[in-house]
Image: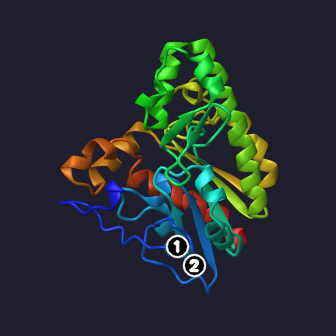
Amino acid sequence: MAYQNMGEGALNYTPCRYGNSKLLFRGPQKDLDAPYVAFLGGTETYGKFVDMPFPALVETSLGMTGVNLGCVNGGVDVFLSDETVLDICRKAEVTVLQIPGAQNISNRFYTVHARRNDRFLRASDELQRMYRNIDFTDFNFTRHLLHTLGAASSKKFAMVREELRRAWSARMETMVEKLHGDVVLLWLSDHSPDDGAACDAIAGDPLFVNCEMVEGLRPLVKDVVEVVATKDEIATGYELMVHSDLDAPAAREMLGPVVHAGAAGMLREALMPYV
């Protein structure tokens, strides 16, 4: 994975593993014998380009161990198939689950890589029949695929987007059930879940997830923390990120440390009753 390679100006994420999991997480490795809060999510939870991501900030402010189980480009599928991760979360005082996008999960239209969920593997026969003029061997990543499908036919793409939303809702319900409901959901984005246009667009994160989907999970979890970053917060945070010149374009896609600090403050208040 490219993000683990240390170049000039890059952070040392001290990657580590837990138990039998094949996934690499951000270190240092934490002691799982003491009480802890688990943080489960994607690239923002991992804290790519951020010296002190929100899991580390919450750990400091709460005075309780925080186990960062963020997985770069990880979706729901990678965690559901990892019993070590699920077991760590079940034994936590509470798990903070960063709400993932709907694009990086296998569904009836396409299959993603089991661990690198942003990787597109194959299209189903149904999707190939819908888009007969598209050569699916051209795609390696889900977003590239979705951009092409959307440009080819907005009507057909609406069906794809709806399928992704249905698959996401079912998979997320399963995730929360496996964690026994001891979950605080974290919406971390540059737009609100109430912004219908932004939630329908093939841009930003969590992709295609809207208010209805989040509200469907609310009765199953302890709380939902909503963090919506402003353009100024993101711009200021970009200047504070640590990355090589080569990684500058990728860093532009991240929310940055200012947003992480704001998320940590809101999470601290939400987690206090459970730790």
Q: Quadrant of the N terminus?
A: bottom left
Judged from this view, the residue extending furthest toward the right is 219
| SS class, disc 2 | loop
Asked if residue 31 is positioned above or below residue 9 in the image, the reply reads below
Q: Where, by quadrant of the figure, is residue 93 drawn?
A: bottom right
The one of 35 and 120 positioned closer to us in this rendering: 120
Tell me the residue at 21%/60% (across/down). 7
User: Which color scheme did the rendering employ for the protein?
Assistant: rainbow
Q: Which residue is labeled 1 in the image?
A: 59
Tell me the residue at 63%/36% (across/down). 209
The amino acid type found where label 1 is placed reads: Glu
| SS class, disc 1 | helix
Residue 157 percent location from the top left of the image: 59, 20
In-image side of 14 versus 136 (left or right): left
Residue 129 percent location from the top left of the image: 62, 18
Label 1: few (<14), some (14–19) or many (≥20) C-alpha neighbours in 10 Å: some
Judged from this view, the residue extending furthest toward the bottom is 33
Q: Which residue is labeled 2 in the image?
A: 64
Mark number for residue 207?
none
- Can residue 160 be seen here? The reply is no
